[in-house]
Amino acid sequence: MRARAVLQKELRAILRDGRFVVLAISLSLLLAGLLFVSAQQHRRVAQEKAEVSALVRQQWDSQGDKHPHRGAHFGLYAFRPDSPLAVVDPGLGPYLGQALWLEPHRRNMTRFRPAADEPPSVRFGALTPAFVLQALLPLLIFALAFNAISLERESGTLRMLHSVGLPGRMLLAGKLVALLAVVSLALLAAVWAGLALVTAGAWPDADALWRAAVLAGAFLMYCGVFAALGLAVSASLASSRRALFVLLGLWIAFVFVVPRLGAANAQRAAPLPTAERFWGDIQRDYAEGLPGDGALAARTQRFDAELLRRHGVRRLEDLPFGAYALRRMDRDAYADRVHAIHFDRLWERYATQESVARIASAFSPTVAMRAVSMKLSGTDLAHQRHFEEAAEQYRRRVNVKIDQWDVDNTRGLTSFDEKYAGDALWRSADAFDYRPPSVVFALRAALPDLGVLLAWAVAACGLLALAARRLQP
């Protein structure tokens, strides 16, 4: 009964607090405006991708008569679809390419980075809904919590509550639950508004709802960390001013200092190769061969000799199929293998950077929350890799299909002018139909960071319990 009375009293106190009204309204208006702008941009980019994809496909289908390999070099684009929750947290999306150019022989990097088109002022500090939730919402919590106990101590209220036998743990628990109850409403409204805006009022699919629910829960746990820390500091320090300075210092360290130091440390621990070196290594391994494979000329000689032996002829010209096209398929398969090795190494570098950066989350819950938010929003490196690998598999299928047509419809060694394909071949290549990974994929990727966030919540609640035990009027 007393616990309910404490909770009701704290809720009324928060809702009547002028600071809360001003800050909450300001933060809500800022968040609503950012969500609206982000949703508008999300729909515009999605429409542009659909239009360009349809145009490129139409041009591909109507190439007309030409040699199949020349037609393959016309190329296709594979566009990365944005997750609905990218409206809330664009994550790495603006810094990663939006599309892959698919062509024979070569696996490309993504193109069209939105951040590259932004003015320097925007690139210096992009204001997103995620930034409001990860940085400004904790500041609001600290603004409400810094004098939650110290002010009652200074006014004598704490002594009165102590005299009537109210346990300190019940008082602090009531204040914590009241703070989180108010914050949870803002979180649910923000995430739901983001989904509603991007889906234009339509009901989101089940995967998006699950992601949103887990993301809202993670944000609530994140806010709980700041609420517990704020109340613990307020209960431990006699002066409200000292509590405010300590909490401001913690906020600056958590939100700005530690994440930047962690990112810098990750870059030093696992530096990325330059583009020149990356592509140069691929070209070298293809031309000179991987260990034990021999150079390109030697590999080609072995392939030709095996082809002649298998079919019992002395010249490639005597083969009953397109030997040149089959040789090209063998070379492309080797190039795909070389590209896969180097791209996997690059992704391993990214993973190492992420693991090193995660060390900083031991000193800042914001680092862990940012990682969880990006992964559940589908705007992290794991989702980007999933898209790029799906596009690479599609590129290989299309090229093999076209080369196989060349093998089946030519004889021996033919030139580019001896056998043409038509629109029927181009149209026979299926369109790129990418299916983003499910929420299970996102949870698996976010599990280490969720564990760190949970550890922060347990530690913060432990500090709050310790402060409650030592609470004195």
Image (cartoon, rainbow, N blue to C red):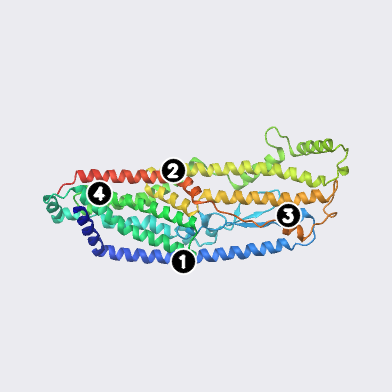
Which comes sooner in the sequence, label 1 or label 3? 1
Which comes sooner in the sequence, label 1 or label 4? 1
Is residue 30 visible in the rendered image? The answer is: yes
Q: Which mark is residue 448?
A: 2
Q: Amino acid at mark 2?
A: Pro
Cα separation, mark 1 vs mark 4, equals 37 Å
Which comes sooner in the sequence, label 4 or label 3? 3
Cα separation, mark 1 vs mark 3, equals 39 Å
Which comes sooner in the sequence, label 3 or label 2? 3
Which comes sooner in the sequence, label 2 or label 1? 1
x and y, in percent, of residue 168 in the image:
19, 48
Q: Residue at x 15, y 54 (%)?
A: 154
Label 3 close to label 2 by CB (< 8 Å): no
Label 2 close to label 1 by CB (< 8 Å): no
How many other residues sit within 10 Å of disc 2, few (<14), some (14-19) or many (≥20)? some
Q: Residue at x 35, y 61 (%)?
A: 186
Q: Which residue is mark 3?
A: 72
Q: Residue furthest front?
A: 1
How many other residues sit within 10 Å of disc 1, few (<14), some (14-19) or many (≥20)? some
